[in-house]
Image (cartoon, rainbow, N blue to C red):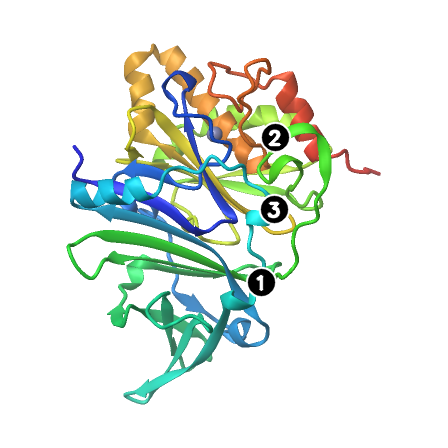
Amino acid sequence: MLRFIILIHFLIGSLVLWGCTTREESEAETSAPAKTYLQGDPAQFIFGTNLNNYIADPSVFTSQKLYLTTSVVISQYNEIEKYQKAVSKQTPSTKPVGPEEIIYGKEENLIEYSPYKTMNGKNYFKLGKKTQKEGKYFYYIFEELEDGGVRLVAIDSNKNYLVLNQDYIHLSVSEDKPLVSILHFHNFYTDGDKVLVAEYFTTSREPPKVNTVGNYNYLQGKNVAVNWNQTKPLVVNLCGKDLNEHADWVEESIGHWQKTLENRLDIQLVRKPLGCPPFSDLNTHNIYLIDGVKTAYDHINAGTTYTIRLNELIESDIFLFKHELYKYAKTYSPESYKKQFLRVVAHEFGHMLGLAHQFNPDIKSIMSYESIFELKDYDIEAVQALYPLRDTP
Ligand SMILES: [Zn+2]
């Protein structure tokens, strides 16, 4: 069935989505595919999550300069011809990710928050890129509320004003980093195609500190270490009822990383069977098990992880694809299915910690596409180099 196809692409590249497949069925090696093609409904990526279109304090938009830093666009084309055209234009990148590809506070990405209009006694404000021509990028329309807060009610794109259903919007402001995210899901203006967009804004104008560590593949590039802040626990939620049915497996798999990182990084797993905020939320790092999404290629793509990095890793979430995992379940015995499930989780969590793929056939690694089911010496050394021992009293 090619009717439902998702195309994920990235307008600006500090975010990487890691398509993870089995080796024997994989495409050419790419250390950081900038684009990944999937089939399925983009709404699946936010289905069952807890959305919020309200910000109590809009001064985040006015008290400092904010720059668009990352956009994620997940599109569904209803017509195969349009999909093929889009795919043909966007061959997966074979270029390794490097700090130079990340855009920090470029003047052209400066955004502005300004009065938009007054209607029926209500004030509306507009947030968007200052220097770009109208229609090229999204403008967000906020309604000012009596309590001083604002809520996102519409977007303006290509001179189309679109009122949004609040079930398909999420706003978040990070607690300890100057970062704002906006997520919205809606139909295109024609053809019934759908799009899910998450945009991230930051005050950061600084490139990352380049910290060279050993001979390892990290998300930021070979030997370029960017990690989570080791002084705080990395809290990761297991989201939704379906994933929590496998919570023991997830905990067992990630437990191997926890053991490896003892006195280096505290990883806390929290079961959230009632759901979590969507992936764009800046204050939660989540693992989701979603249905009905698969890659456009014929290989098994059982999970994917994306990260956002400024001077450190600041945001990451993991998606596990139920439809793809079931292929393992159909192919293997229950014991083997569990092994495959644990392998996928361990591999994806390696990405969340900051590891990139390791495709050198001479190096055994959970970060390869080989049938490797436990952390290997390379994985332990790479992650321990990334997270040096903390001074503990
Ligand atoms: Zn991977």
Identify residue type, mark 3.
Pro
Question: In the image, is 61 to the left or to the right of 8?
Answer: right
Residue furthest toward the front?
Answer: 89
- Residue 65 placement (x, y as % from top left): 57, 71
- Indicate the secondary structure of the residue bearing disc 1: loop
242 w.r.t. 308: above or below: above
Q: Are there few (<14), some (14-19), or many (20+) residues within 10 Å of tag 1?
A: many
Residue 214 appears in the picture as rendered: yes
- In the picture, residue 243 is in which quadrant? top left
- Residue 93 placement (x, y as % from top left): 44, 38
Q: State whether label 2 is within 8 Å of ligand 1.
A: no
Could you tell me how many numbered marks the image carries? Answer: 3
Q: Which residue is mark 1?
A: 105
Q: Which residue is mark 2?
A: 217
**Circles 3, 2 touching at the beta carbon (< 8 Å):** no
Question: In the image, is 289 to the left or to the right of 368?
Answer: left
Q: Which residue is mark 3?
A: 99
- Residue 319 placement (x, y as % from top left): 41, 37
Identify residue type, mark 2.
Asn
- Indicate the secondary structure of the residue bearing disc 2: strand
In which quadrant will I find the C terminus?
top right
Mark 1 and mark 3 lie on one chain; the one further toward the N terminus is 3
288 w.r.t. 277: above or below: above
Mark 2 and mark 1 lie on one chain; the one further toward the N terminus is 1
Question: In the image, is 16 to the left or to the right of 153?
Answer: right
Identify residue type, mark 1.
Gly
As rendered, which of 25 and 61 lies closer to the eye? 25
**Circles 1, 3 touching at the beta carbon (< 8 Å):** no
Q: CA distance from mark 2 to mark 1?
A: 26 Å
